Amino acid sequence: MHTKENIHQKFIEYIEKGRFVLPYCKNCRKTMWPPADYCRLCLNNLSLKDYRNKEGKILQFFLNKFNNNTNTIMIVVELDEVRLIGSLDQDNRNTGNIEGKKVIIKKCGFIDQKIFYQFEIVNN
């Protein structure tokens, strides 16, 4: 178990390593989002729960054209109680309507000091 002084920093360190973890209260069985150093419900210390290979669901998607004129499919994903915005992997470009499809986090990290998430569609 992590102490409340370092859980947020540990979240950042894991993102830097490309691993998506979230603070989780074992007492309340709740994920803390945005990341916090203690449970907002019971004030207990939190542990980190690994979300690698955890399936989420696409709620919305849209096409975004960035400065380099490449089209990127951006998606809003619900992963347990957490909603994230990220991009869809290039291999999943020609998938038609993707709302409701299952995804996992393929990559995460920092670009220009901002967290990014890249997802891929899970073949069921």
Image (cartoon, rainbow, N blue to C red):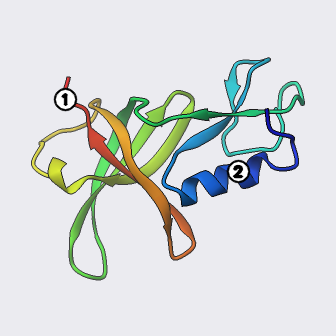
Q: Residue at x 49, y 60 (%)?
A: 109
Q: Quadrant of the C terminus?
A: top left
With respect to residue 31, does 21 lie above or below? below
Q: Residue at x 53, y 45 (%)?
A: 20
In the picture, measured across the screen, residue 3 lies left or right of residue 35, that is right
Mark 2 element type: helix
Three-letter residue code for mark 1:
Asn
In the image, which disc is placed on residue 123? 1
- Residue 18 placement (x, y as % from top left): 48, 54
Q: Residue at x 86, y 40 (%)?
A: 3
Within 10 angstroms of label 1, few (less than 14), some, or many (20 or more) residues?
A: few
- Closer to the N terminus: mark 1 or mark 2? 2
With respect to residue 79, does 17 lie above or below? below
**Quarter occupied by residue 50:** top right
Mark 1 element type: loop
- Residue 87 placement (x, y as % from top left): 34, 55
| Residue bearing mark 2 | 10
